Image (cartoon, rainbow, N blue to C red):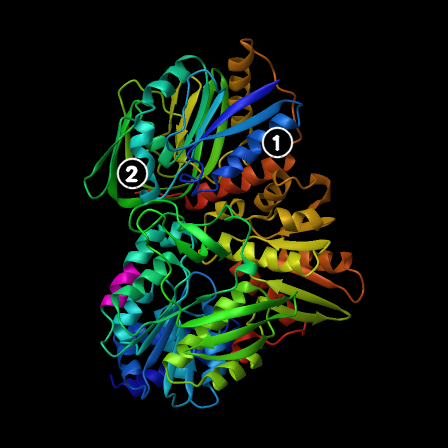
Amino acid sequence: MPLSVGIAGARMAAGLSRLVGAGGGTTVPGKVLSSLDPEVLDRLAQRLPLGAALVSATNGKTTSAAMAAQILSPRVRLAHNASGANLLSGLTSSLLSADSPELGLFEVDEAALPEIARRMRPRAVCLGNLFRDQLDRYGELEHVAERWRSVVQNLDPGAVLVVNGDDPQVGDLARERSGSVVFGLDDPRHKVPELLHAADSKWCLRCGRPYEYTAAYVGHLGDYRCPACGHARPELDVAARRIELRGLDGVDFSLETDGERMPVRLAVPGLYNVYNALAAASLAIGLGSTLDDAVAGLERFRASFGRFERIPIGDKRLLVLLVKNPAGANEAVRTLVSGGPPRLAVLALNDAIADGRDVSWIWDVDWEPLLAGLERVVVTGERAAEMALRCKYGGFSAEAIEVVPELDAALDRGLELSPGGGELVVLPTYTAMLALRRIVADRGFVQPYWKRAA
Amino acid sequence: MTIRVAHLYPEYLNIYADRGNIAVLSSRSRWRGIGFEVESVSLGDVLRAGEHDLLYIGGGQDREQALIALDLAARGEAIREAVAGGAAVLAVCGGYQLLGRSYRGRDGEELPGAGLFPHETVAGDRRMIGDCLLECELETGVRETLAGFENHAGMTRLDDGAVPLGRVVAGFGNDGVSGFEGVRVGSAVGTYLHGPLLPRNPWLADWLLTRALEHRTGESRQLDPLPDDLEEDAHAVAAARAHSRGGRF
């Protein structure tokens, strides 16, 4: 079958999927076409005149890729999987729906990266971080790191590798490849006093001794050095310095590379978004963008859906923060609390495959700083009772926990408890976040994600 | 009255939210007016039999387990002596494996165990991942269920005559074929089930605390009951998960 015929059929399937209300149709056309021709992604990628750039990480890949899209889109026509469909089928769908794209810009699932890189032969790969995440699905951190190492070894000679030097496992990948772009934070005023419970890569890659940190910024990300063998953070090519957190409103920093520096004012908060911004800027610069373009794009960027997204509902607002693993949830908690801790929160825990069927990760999150400020918590989702136990054994009064398993009822209850003009904080896992957005969209308060993503 | 706890290698073996188990044991002691002191016993620290009423050891990734295995094996005698003296033990996943006689990884490399539990573990080709439900009878005539989550490549074979923790109602268990899960030696319990295990199975937490108190005081006593509505709800959901999607070969 000619590729063009397959494409027409697959596009029709996307329309059908939306018509029957089955979802955004963001992966259906890819699934249809991939089932017809498994090599289709390879061929679609070959058609891109500027090639493909891939972004992967445990945390922040959606935001990093969206920031890079803001930087690149004024000058280049992109195919970009903004809705987060980051497996082979989702990338294929994005390529099909894009209008004569020049560059493919894709966030890619950590585990899917080897196959996707093999098929697409990317001209740039940006690797952000590795945290423990959904062990029932991804397996152990070391194994993901090993697969990433093979991705790097198999890159085309001219491809650009961008890595987060602050992550020992990820930064080490740059040592095998000259011309890599290494980014990281450099402002020890913002270090955490001690590594949080969920910190992962604490032991030296080479010799197994504990790293010493001049500064740990987010989880195990920071400026590390092994006192025994000297394995340390590589030199930074792109750095964020003079970081000023502006509560929940955003964060300012100086973006510095190659002797140049420019101030950046981000409209999304938290140190982890500085990491996302560095990943995006480094990737764009690696692809040929100027520092001016990078800064302008970063400053235009607004929250991706479910990532610190504010949704007005009548005279109140939802503040939605996706949580999906310990490191990400810890940063959500830290950022929320730094902006003045909320007194009410809705915690939504599902256990579908995309959330992780194993819910034990909620016990590795340091919820306590959030719980300390809460007067009441509404827990919801299919594993609401498990979340209730996490709060109870985290020292939160059982009487102040409301268990409302149905999401729409929990949302109503949260809104009912929120004062007029107030903001209701909701922390959902991935499928709970999608369901929540559907509920809010059905009530007419937000556009469905597949429209916004277009 | 204070229960003295040794938490073995907490900074290495903590992959499946082991601190949730500690939080449950600690809270359920304190709510009853019983003290609960946790001491970290890690690489190079001294562990003396009899100084602790309860030992806890969790699970880690292969790399972390390899870092502590020799140190743990060298403590085998102290651990066996502690259990012979009536101390309670909860060992989860990697800790459960390493308290046996040996663990052979997929690369063929064999790690020595502490020799407390009568079993050997060999890594298989397939991981056993999913919700798991057990039926247990730790006290004669008292049947309880345990609902947890398992994720292991290790196939654990109990010696003939060894006592498993429970019968598998749904899920894989020790090796996916025997129909049994975990092991029990005196007041020591080993299991693959995390979740973490104790929040949604408070009866096991209370059993461990009871045995630890007996070790401390030399006399048996009943613990005061606690309101466990949330715990029972969570147990019911997890048990239903095991029935609907627990793993099997």
Q: Amino acid at mark 1?
A: Ser
Q: Percent from the top left, x then y, of residue B79?
A: 38, 21
Could you tell me if the residues under marks 2 and 1 are in contact, i.e. CB atoms within 8 Å? Answer: no
Q: Amino acid at mark 2?
A: Gly
Question: What kind of secondary structure does the magenta stretch mostly adopt?
Answer: helix
Seen at 53% across and 67% down, the residue is A273
Name the chain under label 1.
B
Which x, y percent locates residue A1? 24, 83
Q: Nearer the viewer, residue A138 or A353?
A: A138
The residue identified by callout 1 is B27
Segment colored magenta: A147-153
Element type at mark 1: helix
- Looking at the rendered structure, the secondary structure element under dot 2 is strand
- Foreground pick, A209 / A329: A209
Mark linked to residue B154: 2
Name the residue rendered at 63%, 44% in the picture: A391
Quarter residue B90 falls in: top left
Chain under callout 2: B
N-terminal-most mark, 2 or 1: 1
